Amino acid sequence: MNWFGLLFDARRAGDAELVRRLRAGDEACWRELYRRHHARLYRYALRMTGTEAAAGDITQETFVAFLELADRYDAARAPLGAWLLGIARNRVRKALASSAVWEPADEAGEPAARERDPLEAMTQAERLAAVRAAVAALPEAYREVVVLIEFEEMTYEETAAALGAPVGTVRSRLHRARALLQQSLAGRSVVR
């Protein structure tokens, strides 16, 4: 029990408190922030770039930039996760601009498929591949909102903060992206 407030438990602290203490040099706060946000940033970068190597690089670059820019973070303007995704987004854009071909990667860390009929497993794998290919074929602005809202389960407000766009723009991009996906997948007999 922490009777006098002398012990600080980074795992129980909010992101804003961790950033405040990080600015003061508390290394445990850095580790906790990395632990909390690493996986989401990596998944976002992987889904946007399609390669594990690029996703790893972008994730690391995002955290390095965060260390350099930590004094600029304002918890009143956006949650830290959205702010970090904004940094990662800039890194993804640079990576996409410098690479000629984008191929969807297999999902890292997906849970193993439940035991089932081999035909069902193959059909499910084909559907998943079709969805991944359709998402990969979306223009970047639409792919971003699909990745953040549908895959990362961010709210419209969090997505807007990460993209630096109004909520209405996020909603309209998602609506258009869903229409494009439905159109793309209808030809493959994936949409029911």
Image (cartoon, grey):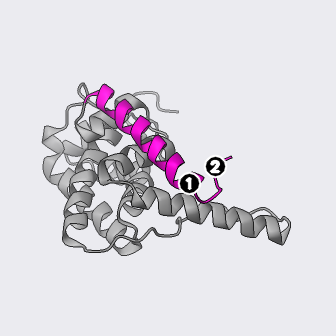
Left or right, 123 with reference to 48: right
Looking at the image, residue 127 lies above or below residue 99: above
Quarter where residue 83 is shown: top left
Q: Which residue is mark 1?
A: 185
Instruction: Give the farthest residue toward the front.
Output: 187
Residue at 20% across / 65% down in the picture?
97
Residue at 38% across / 43% down in the picture?
145
Is residue 8 among the parts visible in the rendering? no
Depth check: 23 or 93 in front? 93
Classify mark 2: helix, strand or loop: loop
Q: Main secondary structure of the magenta part?
A: helix
Quarter where residue 129 is shown: bottom right
Instruction: Look at the image and give the residue range highlighted in magenta.
Output: 166-192
Depth check: 86 or 175 in front? 175
Pointers 2 and 1 in contact (CB under 8 A)? Answer: yes
Is-magenta flag for residue 181? yes
Residue at 27% across / 40% down in the picture?
163
Depth check: 13 or 69 in front? 69
Q: Which residue is mark 2?
A: 191
Q: Residue 174, position in %: x, y?
A: 41, 38
Under mark 2, the amino acid is Val
Depth check: 97 or 17 in front? 97
Is residue 40 among the parts visible in the rendering? yes
Q: Earlier in the sequence, mark 2 or mark 1?
A: 1
Q: Residue 13, position in %: x, y?
A: 40, 35
Is-magenta flag for residue 99? no
Left or right, 98 with reference to 32: left
Classify mark 1: helix, strand or loop: helix
Left or right, 182 with reference to 171: right
Under mark 1, the amino acid is Leu
The residue carrying pointer 2 sits among few (fewer than 14), some (14 to 19) or many (20 or more) residues within 10 Å by Cα, namely: few
